[in-house]
Image (spheres, rainbow, N blue to C red):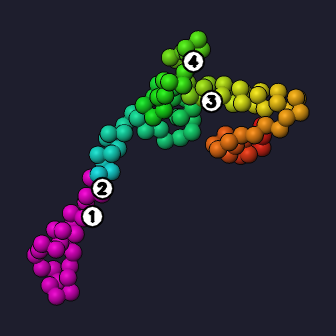
């Protein structure tokens, strides 16, 4: 595969052809290396994220685990369900007391995205 220049149709490869080929091949090589490195680490779907263990390298945050409720077999989906249940229970309790709950940042975005459910 060599690029054909108007002045030298079909001529032998030259330095500019090699540079162009290198520029085209480099990103592909980098993608291949990244894929090889991320094999077993990358999660490609929401179901893979929810089914992944909480100790998965992409979201290990041991400082956020409360020891009495910690179980190493916990899945990310279970952890998120527990957080959601706690958040919604707290909001309902505040509403029963006549207070309007206020959520900040990412919690607020999620709350709005799911219509406060």
Q: Is residue 11 magenta?
A: yes
Earlier in the chain: of badge 1 and badge 3, it is 1
Q: Nearer the viewer, mark 2 or mark 4?
A: 4
Q: Is residue 27 magenta?
A: yes
Q: Residue at x 64, y 44 (%)?
A: 105
Q: Are dots 2 and 1 in contact, CB under 8 Å?
A: yes
Q: What residue would you read off at disc 3?
A: 80
Asked whether the beta carbons under mark 1 and mark 4 sit within 8 Å of each other, the answer is: no
- Please indicate, yes or no, whether residue 89 appears anywhere in the rendered image: yes
Which residue position holds label 2?
28
Query: Is residue 13 visible in this depiction of the protein?
Result: no
Numbered disc 3: secondary structure = helix
Q: Which residue is mark 1?
A: 24
Where on the picture, by quarter, is residue 85? top right
Q: Which residues are magenta?
A: 1-29
Residue 81 drawn at (x, y percent): 66, 28
In three-dimensional space, the C-alpha distance between marks 4 and 3, rounded to whole angstroms, equals 14 Å
Quadrant into which the C terminus falls: top right
Q: Position of residue 23 (x, y in %)?
A: 24, 64
């Amino acid at each position: 595969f060599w690029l054909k220049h108007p002045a030298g149709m079909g001529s032998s490869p030259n330095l500019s052809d090699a540079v162009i080929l290198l520029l085209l091949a480099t990103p592909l090589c980098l993608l291949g290396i990244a894929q090889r490195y991320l094999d077993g680490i990358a999660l490609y779907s929401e179901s893979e994220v929810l089914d992944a263990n909480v100790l998965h390298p992409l979201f290990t945050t041991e400082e956020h685990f409360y020891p009495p409720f910690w179980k190493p077999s916990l899945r990310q989906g279970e952890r998120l369900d527990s957080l959601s249940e706690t958040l919604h229970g707290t909001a309902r309790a505040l509403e029963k007391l006549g207070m309007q709950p206020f959520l900040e940042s990412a919690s607020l975005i999620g709350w709005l995205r799911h219509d406060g459910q």
